[in-house]
Image (cartoon, rainbow, N blue to C red):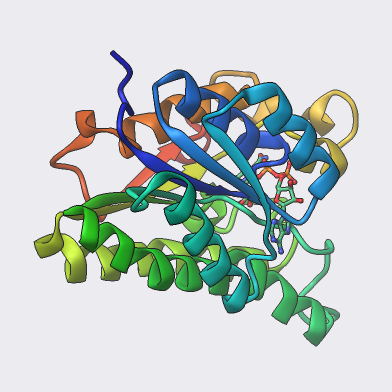
């Protein structure tokens, strides 16, 4: 028996990186998964490999109309949505606040923060129909503290907002049996992190008490836990997974 048997999940930004490993893990645990992304080529390749319990949909998470389409197609294919992983995110450029471009600020906030509002707004009615659900909002250690090396204030601000919205929605929809949690990864080996650092991780592994970066699958373990019934009494909380980085 899988931990997600009978669950229908939407995972955004699932064409690569942590979204991809979450999707693989969810399918292995019995879920039906709608993977969404703006990267259609990679997304389509991936679902071809994942089998009948995976569907890929083109989805720009900054577009409310795209969200409505994704919910409709997910319900049509698999029934009411019971798990949402708001994973898509971007770093934006490395910039000081005084030099940060206003349009770049708005773009980072749209992809990292506004998308999580649109996602929860759109999917909550489906969860209510199903009698409950679990929402996992992917934030960052940058949503706990302004770590040295955070690229810009919009990244930090949007990841703090994710944490705050998580608590608000958890309180509001607890009576509907909808649990909402945020996940705060540290340094994880994904294409995003590879693009932001040099080959050895920019020496950043040395900043971590465990002295290494994490594999994305280690974060998938936590996301799976929060999505499945093993965490049935956990809601409204932030879950840091950073090898001890923010404990220092
Ligand atoms: N990698 C890390 O070390 C790290 C640390 C903390 C938090 N995070 C967060 O984890 C999440 C996943 O990060 P990752 O490292 O796997 O990143 P990644 O860049 O490898 O993957 C992100 C995916 O999101 C997609 N995406 C970007 N903009 C989108 C949009 N507008 N609509 C739909 N999809 C879009 C991309 O196409 C890509 O497939 C992000 O929210 C990121 O901020 C990552």
**Do we see residue 138 in this rendering?**
no
**Do we see residue 149 in this rendering?**
yes
Quadrant for residue 169, please give it: bottom left
Q: Is residue 45 above or below residue 144?
A: above
Report x, y in % for residue 248.
48, 37
Looking at the image, the residue that sits furthest to the left is 175
192, 17: nearer the viewer: 17
Looking at the image, the residue that sits furthest to the top is 1
35, 117: nearer the viewer: 35
Report x, y in % for residue 43.
74, 41
Quadrant for residue 180, please give it: bottom left
Report x, y in % for residue 38.
76, 56
Name the residue located 65 percent from the left edge and 72 percent from the top edge. Answer: 62
Looking at the image, the residue that sits furthest to the right is 198
Name the residue located 22 percent from the left edge and 62 percent from the top edge. Answer: 128
Q: Is residue 17 above or below residue 152?
A: above
Q: Is residue 225 above or below residue 138?
A: above
Name the residue located 49 percent from the left edge and 73 percent from the top edge. Answer: 118
Q: Is residue 155 above or below residue 74?
A: below
């Amino acid at each position: 028996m899988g931990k997600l048997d009978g669950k229908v999940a939407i995972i955004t930004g699932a064409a690569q990186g942590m979204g991809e490993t979450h999707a693989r893990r969810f399918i292995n645990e019995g879920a039906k998964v709608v993977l969404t992304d703006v990267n259609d080529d990679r997304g389509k390749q991936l679902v071809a490999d994942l089998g009948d319990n995976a569907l890929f949909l083109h989805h720009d998470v900054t577009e409310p109309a795209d969200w409505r389409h994704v919910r409709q197609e997910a319900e049509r294919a698999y029934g009411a949505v019971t798990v949402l992983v708001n994973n898509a995110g971007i770093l934006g450029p490395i910039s000081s606040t005084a030099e940060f471009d206003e349009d770049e600020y708005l773009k980072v906030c749209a992809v990292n923060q506004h998308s999580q509002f649109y996602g929860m707004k759109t999917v909550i009615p489906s969860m209510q129909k199903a009698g409950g659900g679990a929402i996992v909002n992917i934030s960052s250690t940058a949503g706990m503290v302004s770590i040295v090396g955070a690229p810009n204030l919009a990244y930090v601000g949007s990841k703090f907002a994710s944490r705050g919205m998580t608590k608000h929605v958890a309180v509001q929809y607890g009576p509907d049996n909808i649990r909402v949690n945020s996940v705060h990864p540290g340094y994880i080996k994904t294409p995003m992190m590879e693009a932001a650092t040099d080959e050895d991780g920019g020496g950043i592994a040395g900043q971590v008490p465990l002295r290494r970066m994490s594999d994305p699958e280690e974060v998938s373990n936590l996301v799976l836990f929060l999505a499945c019934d093993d965490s049935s009494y956990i809601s409204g909380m932030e879950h840091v997974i950073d090898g001890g980085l923010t404990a220092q």
